[in-house]
Image (cartoon, rainbow, N blue to C red):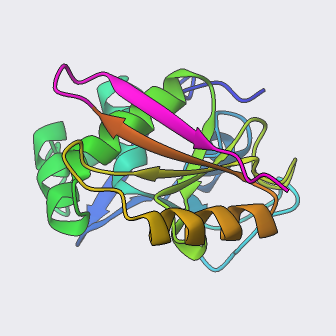
Amino acid sequence: MAESAPKTKVEARLVGRRIVVFDRVKGRNMYFNDGFYGKFFMVSKPKTPNVERELELSVLDAVYLAEEGKLTILDAEGNKVEVDVLKKIGEEMYENFNEVYIVYRDLRGKNLIVKSGMKFGATFVVYRLGPGLEHAPFLVHVLPYNSKLDPIEIVRAGRLSHSVRKRFIIAYVDTSRKVNYLQFKWLM
């Protein structure tokens, strides 16, 4: 099983809104050995660990790794970018970023691999072992605590998750900042 964070501190650069690890060896290790963080430029699904590309981290990955003390992010001038600045970028890029990040952090804390679930209409696709090693068993969709559940959307998500053989889970962060999960099972 992949570990929750890299063993050595890695340096990344903030380029616009992108966080890039230019050291290809460290990027490769971060991806294949330390938890499948980020994605390689121009490589959709790496099958072997001989990738020779830069690694782009999501804002969620970068905030998590920086908070864990495993990543240093520098701007174009070489100044350290603080976690609060990354979180502000995340808030501009993602709807309900703070809740999404709390759920991301909780899932990573359970040694799960968390990737974007956009192509499935969910917040995350979640792996136990990692992409390329298994098909992701879970789709996790993060909803704000006070949002209303539309029954049609639940049925739509349930049908999709069933057709791609993944468990559909809704996650929310309650007022005490505890993450709660609701799993839906398609009965046939």
- Tell me where residue 3 appears, x and y as whole percent: 65, 24
- 130 vs 43: above or below: above
Question: Which stretch did the figure color magenta?
Answer: 174-188
Number of numbered discs present?
0
Judging depth in this view, the residue of 130 and 99 nearest the camera is: 99
Q: Position of residue 166 (x, y in %)?
A: 75, 54
Farthest-out residue, bottom: 42
- In depth, the one of 167 and 126 nearer the eye is 167
- Give the prevailing secondary structure in the magenta stretch: loop
The question of residue 127 being in magenta is answered with no
Quarter of the image for the N terminus: give it.
Answer: top right
Q: Position of residue 152 (x, y in %)?
A: 48, 72
Residue at (86, 49) in percent of width and height: 134
Q: Is residue 74 left or right of residue 92?
A: right
Q: Is residue 67 above or below residue 116?
A: above
Nearest the camera: 166 or 132? Answer: 166
* Residue 71 visible at all: no
Say left or right for 172 vs 80. right
Quadrant, the C terminus: bottom right
